Amino acid sequence: MGDRIPASEPVGLADAVAGWRADGVELVELSFVDNAGNVRVKAVPLERLPVAARFGVGASPCFETFTFDDVMVPGRHLGGPDGDLRLVPDLDRLVRLAAMPGWAWAPADKFTQDGERFVGCQRAFAARQARAAADAGLAVFAAFEHEWALGRDDTEEFVPAFDGPGYGQVRLEAVADYARELVAALRAQGLEVQQFHPEYALGQLEVSVAAADPVAAADDAVLVRHTVRAVSRWHGWRASFAPCLVPGGAGSGGHLHLSVHDADGNLLADGPGPHGMRAAGESFLAGVLRELPALVAIGAGNPASFLRLEPSRWAGVWQVWGREAREAALRLVTGTTGTEQWAANVEVKCFDGTANPYLAVGAVLAAGLAGAREQLRLPAEVTGDPAALGEHDRLAAGIHRLPTSAAAAADALAASEVLSEAMGPELHDAMLTVRRAEAERYADADPAEIAAATRWRW
């Protein structure tokens, strides 16, 4: 979608509406994701969709500085009670919701009442970074891993819907029908499921879908989680993508995978650099590695995120990289011999489900592109668990812990010139406003209070 609201109704929309009506669609949900990672929605009857596509649906800009628990904290540029935005659905992504009969869904772009693109539009930020990559001759493909926990729906506490060993067949047997229905719903909505399995934490499952361009990958993330929650309700369960449901245990992540290509192929394969990386690919990863402290504020900056971000839990709390290094925040996945060109990618392990996926993918792109422009080089890779080393040995090896609190992560974002420039002053400040307000309000809360406050928000 361009930088202005379309000047006319899309060609063929009337016929498309008739087709969706024949498919049973009665209402269309338009969604956007705020800076706290909450998905906000407006809905219109199907017959109103042409009007929404031409003029948008009204939404207050106050949500730009809403915290995860719906507290409004105006920033320097955005937030507050005044003004109005127009949510314009991206009809190319409109899909009938298989798990919500009678409904369709489309992600929305934000415009002003004057028809201009809104400066705080997170989806537009991701699109800008994708265009910047294309202008540099690069094509980026991305995908999020989705981890969630299933709990009983008759309590605000978390009571796992099933038990059994991590990754165990016993768990799979307990959710076999659920998994089949979930995968079928995702497939019916045009998503290619690549893997489903029971995970390690209490009541935890994981699904992965195929990579797509950066904006589509973020759209897919919203749609996958929406579908998971809806199918879970069919079964009388409640799904949570929150990073920590029970303090002290393993939590749920939202790892981001990316591969970067130029006209000659994958920049992370068939090259002379470490593990087959080409020079431009190494520089891209080095840029992401440099900005990781600031990226934490975007991808895992909620107070609950730091209940998950603990050493020796494969959460990626160290500002290091390594091939298949699951304690590293940046894990290089080279693929099996013979698959490198299509399989080699990098995983950002420190992210979780509190992230706005558009901001997460856009910020990682901005960091990587800055590294490519500056021709950065990676430090030595790290293997094993850095927590097993003494602090002196870690520092000598250049191994640093990522921010350990929401406030520290926000400070790192504030100090990042790369992300400040890429996001622009309005979006950058709005993100800082949200994260700092959350950090301040929960600074004295104990882990159980933070987990309870965040358990069912995502």
Image (cartoon, rainbow, N blue to C red):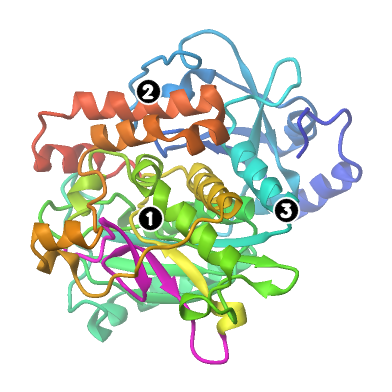
Please name the residue shown 37% across and 78% down the image.
176
Question: Looking at the picture, which amino acid does disc 3 mark?
Answer: Ala
Find the residue positioned furthest to the top. 82
Camera sees residue 211: no
Give the x, y percent position of residue 84. Answer: 61, 15
Q: Residues within 10 Å of mark 3 (few under 14, many from 20)?
A: some
Give the x, y percent position of residue 72. Answer: 37, 18
Alpha carbons under labels 2 and 3: distance apart: 31 Å
N-terminal label among 2 and 3: 3
Question: Looking at the picture, which amino acid does disc 2 mark?
Answer: Thr
Please name the residue shown 48% across and 24% down the image.
64
Reading the image, the residue beneath label 1 is 233
Asked whether 293 falls inside the magenta stretch, the response is: no
Q: Quadrant of the N terminus?
A: top right
Q: Nearer the viewer, residue 325 or 44?
A: 325
Alpha carbons under labels 1 and 2: distance apart: 34 Å
What numbered label is drawn on residue 134? 3
Alpha carbons under labels 1 and 3: distance apart: 41 Å
Q: Which residues are magenta?
A: 312-339
* Left-right relation of 68 to 10: left
Question: Looking at the picture, which amino acid does disc 1 mark?
Answer: Arg
Reading the image, the residue beneath label 2 is 433
Residue 127 vs 286, above or below: the answer is above
Q: Nearer the viewer, mark 2 or mark 3?
A: 3
Give the x, y percent position of residue 219. Answer: 58, 51
What numbered label is drawn on residue 154? none
Q: Quadrant of the C terminus?
A: top left
Is mark 1 in CB contact (under 8 Å) with mark 2? no
